[in-house]
Amino acid sequence: MIDHRLQTLRVLRERGTVTAAAEALHLTPSTVSQQLRQLSRELGVDLLEAQGRRVRLTAAAHTVLRHADVLSAQWELARADLAGHRAGTAGHVRFCSVSSALAALVAPAAALLREEHPRLTVHMSEKESDDTAHLLLARHCDIAVVIPTGATPAPDDARFAQWPLLDEPQDLLVPAGHPLAARGTALLSDAAAEPWIGSPDRSDQHQLMLASCAAAGYAPRIAHEANEWFAVSALVARGFGVGLVPRLAPLPPEDQVVRVPLRGAVVPTRRIVACVRRGSDGQRPIARGLEALREAARNRG
């Protein structure tokens, strides 16, 4: 078994502070500090150094972490091999996902697992993409369904394995009766003069909107801000602005809004990705969960 103190050090690297690492691991900050002091003494090197009121990982700590990442991946593979000797056991798999993918992909995947593997326990939770790394590393989830951002694991991050599930276009959301509503399709540049509904707390969506409008030749004039899709829809329906919405995102049927598909050189699209701890996809419950996700994505396509 991998020394749990190495896992604590890995989470500290990800979260940045002892307090945040303790919160992710459901420990007290003093316990985290004590574990790392013990590990430092046993290894004979300093792992942390003070930086004002914070701590910083030393060069030796980064060396330890490189080996810890390899050990963790090998341990996941070992668990997968051992699972092969327990064929027929129930098992469990935990999903975390952004809201739209939870509704469109994870819930159908979980229903498929319930039908095909009734003894497999499934748990689902809605989480933002930026929480992915620490949730996986702290083993609070097994499969994360995310929208890649600057805060999610890079494709070459050795700690994780990732697979694209679906490329989801964005639609321009306008109120019923808007001139663009009757066109069938539109260019993103057609909305340059419109007031926009921004979603600053939904970082993946907000970054995509800003980058796409910039590529179309303008900076959107953000008149109002809303993060939940039903709130964005309500503001658009009442004429307070236009917005971008993922095609998978459900909207209240009573709102008088029109989704206008975009065409041309700039069609905002976000990629939905499944992410797991490297090596863990060999474990039967996680492998089944990934296959169910792929099936749900194929059905959406």
Image (cartoon, grey):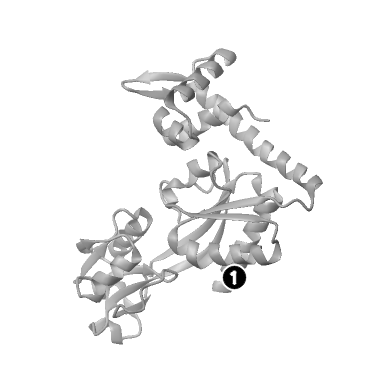
- Residue 116: % across, % down: 70, 65
Can you name the residue that lies furthest to the right here?
85
Instruction: Decide if residue 276 is on the left or right side of residue 11.
Output: right
> 192 or 276: nearer the eye?
276
Determine whether the residue tagged by mark 1 lies in a helix, strand or loop: helix
Q: Tag 1: residue type?
A: Arg
The vertical placement of 290 against 184, above or below, is above
The residue located at (29%, 64%) in the rendering is 213
- Residue 25: % across, % down: 50, 35
Q: How many marks?
A: 1
- Residue 187: % across, % down: 31, 76
Q: Quadrant of residue 230?
A: bottom left
> In which quadrant of the rendered image does the C terminus lie?
bottom right
The residue that label 1 is drawn on is 298
Instruction: Decide if residue 294 is on the left or right side of residue 104.
Output: right
> 277 or 4: nearer the eye?
4
Q: Quadrant of residue 42?
A: top right
Instruction: Decide if residue 204 is on the left or right side of residue 280.
Output: left
Can you name the residue that lies furthest to the bottom here?
182
Q: Can the viewer see residue 242?
A: no
The residue located at (31%, 59%) in the rendering is 227
The vertical placement of 120 against 247, above or below, is above
Q: Can the viewer see residue 168?
A: yes
Q: Residues within 10 Å of mark 1 (few under 14, many from 20)?
A: few
- Residue 152: % across, % down: 45, 47
The residue located at (35%, 77%) in the rendering is 259
> In which quadrant of the rendered image does the N terminus lie?
top right
